[in-house]
Image: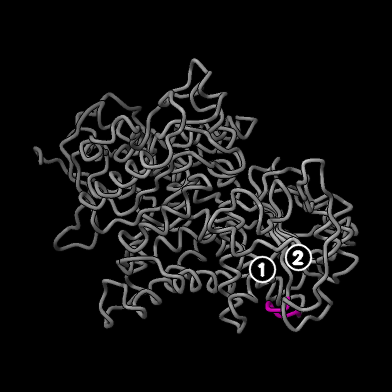
Amino acid sequence: MLHFKIKKHPSQNYNYVETSITGKPLLTTPQLNKGTAFTLEERKVFGLSGKLPAHVETLEEQVNRMYLQYLSYETPLQKNTYLNKLHDTNEVLFYKLVQDRESEMIPIIYTPTVGIAIEKFSREFQQARGLYISYEQRHQIEDILDNRSNPEIDLIVASDGGGVLGIGDQGVGAMLIPVAKLMVYTVCGGVNPLKTLPILLDAGTDNPLLLNDPYYLGWRHPRITGQAYDEFIELFVSAVQKKFPEVFLHWEDFGRDNARIILERYQDRICSFNDDIQGTGATALSALLAAVKTTGTPLTEQRFVIFGGGTAGIGIADQICRQLQLEGLSEADAHARFWIVDRSGLLLSDSKDLTDGQRPYARHFDEATRQHPHPSAAKTAASTFSHSQDSSGRRDIDLLTVVQEVKPTALIGCSAQGGAFTEEIVKAMAEAVPRPIIFPLSNPTQKAEATPQDLLNWTQGLALIATGSPFPLPTWQGKPRQIAQCNNALVFPGIGLGVLAARARCVTDKMLWAACTALYRCAPIHKDSQAPLLPAMENARKSARDIAIAVAKQAREEGVAGIAASENIEEHVDALIWEAEYLPFRKTEGF
């Protein structure tokens, strides 16, 4: 654990760093290093004289030089590597550089580029960051937590690497996801990086490419399941609760079979959140609300086809379903608005291996429904799908058939099947719907179900589009068309900041709805029908503040906040927002 403290001057309104670290160790500690910005006096006091060039730079001068270096790299992966090395060298400089160029650099440090870096993790490994806890170390978790670098922890992002983006089981390489998520928490939400901790829970891997790779750095063992896995997670949560009783625990990229179970098991015991389920759902619902307003058709009359029945797809369905119930539909009628297509086709009640999350959305094979243009309820106008049946008796209803029969108003992709929204499928949808809502949300970019340019071409420019990854700016009729990126980075940093500001004991459905509504209100399309459905990434920091305030107010309204009714929430949020700036140093003899 590093020996430093951030203190406020008792009589003057400024913070300073107090530490006993000197010389080369100070220059190699990213949380403290200022590099060429150390003042002459600080160089003298902390044993840095002669260890740096003579010129004392400002932070702005350093940022300009770092950006020149950044531009010298050609590929996104090279740029990702460069920025991560800077992050490992000087945190303040890294965050100032990225904050000044959010829309340019977030796709480099986060999705989609982080997916490429994860696949190359073991062979490209240079610098450890965060804490790695393998199953074999399950009885040493408290000791491992004590080996953290940052002394005070408010926020943990943990992953077991079981279901990373659209690339599946990535084992120990998934550590780059918690690291990247925490970067985004700071860049977009202003969460103090000195109070965060990325953790990789190494439960083994079922990825044969990793198990057979001589350079693989993780635990070389098939992924544990069942009681052994549950015991591992229980030991982890218990240790975290003991060490950090008020921490906000963010679960990330757990496999489909574990993500929902873990969230439901622990969400009332420790303040926790699953971005794949809750963040994805809130972001998609915000974009959907903006699109629905544009179409003029109420949300309760929309028909949703979701391609991909995994953690993200079901998370989106659940978020929309809750809103449908708030708007007057029964639970059964809300579920009946959805047709979820997975790898084996439309989810049916007799499909094998249905998860608990999928089961409410599964259709009976004999009563799949076709909707009239203006249904009064989801259960009207029942008819039977055409279908195929192979020699084994298996009955598959594919995406094209579902689209042709259901005539969905909204088509959402979470399948990681690049190009799955074909021209035939999209045109079949557009023939029946004046303004089709189409969200190809899969990451990384090559896994997206369709490109914005194709969707505009196939729908005569009428599609309302949001993508999971950034794409080149499409055009329609010779004019550029801005497209929303339905990126969780627009919502989870604000949720985290709001939880911390309110000192919330849990994350409730109403807090998620408050986040969703706050993001929806920021949508540019409210002012221009051709504008994007969500704010641009360069506005993510402002949106995060609005979301944080809404989330914190809702937490207090529900009685799950640790702040009094008399306290000003806006002031609490603003007080927590960390700025990338250098603080003066004072030397102490030790702690």
Q: Residue 23 placed where, x, y %?
A: 22, 28
Give the residues in magenta: 297-301
Q: Are marks 2 and 1 in contact (CB under 8 Å)?
A: yes
Q: Residue at x 59, y 64 (%)?
A: 360
| Pointer 2 residue | 437
| Pointer 1 residue | 288
Task: Name the element at disc 1.
Answer: helix
Which comes sooner in the sequence, label 2 or label 1? Answer: 1
C-alpha distance separating marks 2 and 1: 8 Å
Q: Residue at x 26, y 83 (%)?
A: 566
445 inside magenta stretch? no
Q: Is residue 1 above or below residue 498?
A: above
| Label 1 Cα neighbours within 10 Å, binned few <14 / some 14-19 / many ≥20 | many
Left or right of 403: which side holds 349? left
Q: Quadrant of the C terminus?
A: top left
Q: Amino acid at mark 2?
A: Ile
Q: In which quarter of the view is residue 444 placed?
A: top right
Q: In which quarter of the view is residue 407 placed?
A: bottom right
Q: Which mark is residue 344?
A: none
Q: Residue at x 30, y 54 (%)?
A: 154
Residue placed most toward the observer, 266 or 579: 266
299 inside magenta stretch? yes
Is residue 41 in view? no
Residue placed most toward the observer, 446 or 167: 167
Is residue 271 in view? yes
Q: Is residue 141 above or below residue 394?
A: above
Left or right of 139: which side holds 210? right
Q: In which quarter of the view is residue 1 placed?
A: top left
Q: Amino acid at mark 1?
A: Leu
Q: Residue 147 placed where, x, y %?
A: 23, 36
